Amino acid sequence: MTNLSFEGMMAVARQCQDVIRGINQDSEDDMEDAITAGEPLAAIESALDAAYDHPELSRRFPPQVRRMAEDPDNFELEPYREYLNT
């Protein structure tokens, strides 16, 4: 299980927002909405979805995101495991 506080999750979500800045405005808007609503995992998922077609971005995600994708408790991120390890 990933041991991040809510504040830690929000910080990671904001870092992910920086990774996709300029790639997909709709995803950036979705992330901002999720962050505003206090849903950092949804924001991270939006970032990964936007970056999926850009393999060069995979290494720019914070290491916490890779650990979260490996955590069975974060099943929402499971589809991105392989992408994050490219």
Image (cartoon, rainbow, N blue to C red):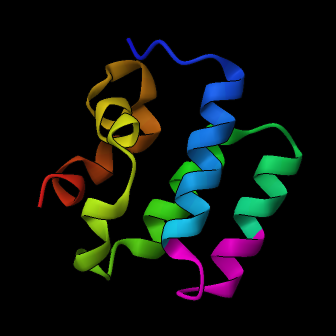
Residue 9 is drawn in which quadrant? top right
The picture places residue 67, in percent across and down from the top left corner, at 30, 31
The picture places residue 70, in percent across and down from the top left corner, at 26, 30
Q: Which residue appears at 47% of the width and 12% of the height? A: 3
Residue 51 is drawn in which quadrant? bottom left
The picture places residue 54, in percent across and down from the top left corner, at 31, 81
Say how many tags the image has. Answer: 0
Q: Nearer the viewer, residue 8 or 40?
A: 8
Q: Looking at this rendering, what residue extends furthest in the left direction?
A: 86
Q: Which residue appears at 38% of the width and 31% of the height? A: 68
Magenta run includes residue 72: no
Tell whether 53 sits left or right of 83. right
Q: Is residue 18 above or below residue 54?
A: above
Which secondary structure type mostly characterizes the magenta part of the structure?
helix
Q: Which residue appears at 70% of the width and 81% of the height? A: 26
Q: Which residues are magenta?
A: 20-29
Tell whether 67 sits left or right of 83. right
The picture places residue 60, in percent across and down from the top left corner, at 34, 62
Q: Which residue appears at 53% of the width and 57% of the height? A: 16
